[in-house]
Amino acid sequence: MSFPTRKSIKASVRAQWEQTPNGAFVLKKEKFNGDSLIDLLKQLIRQYSERKIHLVTDNAPYHKGPRVREWLEANSNSIEVRSLSKYSSKLNATEYVWRKVKRLTTHDRYFKTAKKLAGELFRRFHRFQANPASLRDTIAGFL
């Protein structure tokens, strides 16, 4: 049984690759936009204030909006952002992580509510954070 409506949950994933993957995630129901990206970038700068951040993004329109570009220029000493070329999902480690999340968590599963879906996604990401080695094979080509 399925309902005639489709709901989704937007998620942003960030990962720091050093000797082992260590990541964080944000799950939201509201739409991602330039303001939510700037909020995330501010959080990154606070968390990694002792070093410059080099961030690779995909080509979501809000990654390149005027407010985001202006903010990045004002904070260029703390963070540098590079975008992947269009249609380059094979170069984006996050795409491989999402593929694994879908296979293990959402593929062929029905969630009666968005809250139940979000709960399962949180559990999966918490498992990755508790055991980063479980992603080693998934992101081996990026290390």
Image: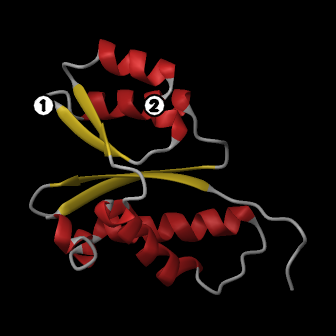
In the rendered image, the vertical position of residue 107 relative to residue 128, given as above or below: below
The x and y percentages for residue 25 are: 42, 52
Disc number for residue 51? 1
Q: Is residue 36 left or right of residue 98?
A: right
| Residue shown at the point (19%, 64%) measured from the top left | 142
Residue identifier under label 2: 64
In the rendered image, the vertical position of residue 67 relative to residue 108, given as above or below: above
- Rounded to the nearest whole Å, what is the CA distance between mark 2 and mark 1? 23 Å
Task: Give the quadrant of residue 18.
Answer: bottom left
In the rendered image, the vertical position of residue 48 relative to residue 104, given as above or below: above
Query: Marks 1 and 2: in contact by CB < 8 Å?
Result: no
Task: Give the quadrant of residue 17.
Answer: bottom left
The x and y percentages for residue 96 are: 36, 70
Q: Quadrant of the N terminus?
A: bottom right
Q: Secondary structure at mark 2?
A: helix
Q: Is residue 33 left or right of residue 140?
A: right
Q: Secondary structure at mark 1?
A: loop
Residue type, numbered disc 1: Arg
Disc number for residue 92? none
Task: Give the quadrant of residue 81.
Answer: top left
The x and y percentages for residue 143 are: 13, 64
